[in-house]
Amino acid sequence: MTQFEYLIILVSILVGLGLADLAKSMRNLLLPEMSVQWHWLPVTWTVIVLGYVLMAWWVFYILLQAEVWHHPVAFLPVLLSTMALYLLCAFALPDADREEVSYHTVDAEGEKLIDMETFYLSEDHRRWFFGMAATFSFLFFGSANYGQFHAGNIPVEAALLQMLSASLLITIPHVILGVTRRRWAHLGLTIYSLGSVTYGLFDVAVALTEVS
């Protein structure tokens, strides 16, 4: 077993656990006996998180082939970003079996109802979900830019500039969404984030074509 295979297995396990948690949450919400008042914002962010998973998976496939990540200290940011991605998947959708939470209401017939908008805008959800999103994006882009610098593809100035740009364009919007309940901000930045992850996936696809 090569060092690359040894490292990618750990990343694969964490990513797989995140996807399994996300799929389980969606399955529980789609059960016929579950009453859910759907809202487009958490559903859109579920799609965005899936985009983050795809982008991270293929970037790590390219990234971890470099020997620099074979040192435990150097690998730590990659491991932490993968753990943040797992938690991001776990926090994306509400747990249908939880009791006594703000997003559980009662409909006109007295049945328990999960209000997706209330869940999404709740302080606890925003704090943890977008906090993990900001943590993931900062560590992910930091690792990617360091990997490019170490491989000699870009000078240190360009790596720092790209890291600053990623923080301003990706990480800061996550922080803003975590601290505000304003619907216009969530509407605009959610659409912006969906466009950003779509662009990122195309960028990764081009990079994979060049590598192959």
Image: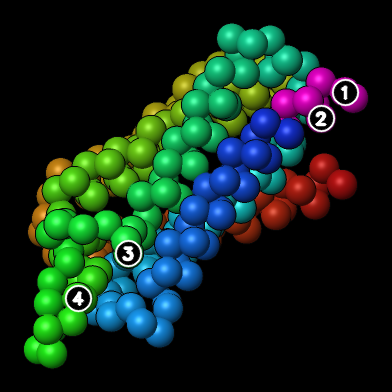
Mark closer to the chain start, 3 or 4 = 3
Residue 196, by quadrant, is bottom left
In this view, the residue farthest toward the bottom is: 109
Badge 1 vs badge 4, beta-carbon distance below 8 Å: no
Q: How is the image coloured?
A: rainbow
Question: Could you tell me if residue 141 is visible in this image?
Answer: no
Tell me the CA gap for discs 2 and 1: 5 Å
User: Mark 2 = which residue?
Assistant: 5
Badge 3 vs badge 2, beta-carbon distance below 8 Å: no
Tell me the CA gap for discs 3 and 1: 42 Å
Q: Amino acid at mark 2?
A: Glu
Tell me the CA gap for discs 1 and 4: 52 Å
User: Mark 3 = which residue?
Assistant: 96
What range of the chain is rendered magenta? 1-8
Relative to 126, 82 lies left or right: right
Q: Residue at x 17, y 64 (%)?
A: 103
Question: Residue 88 versus residue 58: which sits nearer the camera?
Answer: 88
Question: Residue 35 versus residue 164: which sits nearer the camera?
Answer: 35
User: Mark 1 = which residue?
Assistant: 2
Badge 2 vs badge 1, beta-carbon distance below 8 Å: yes
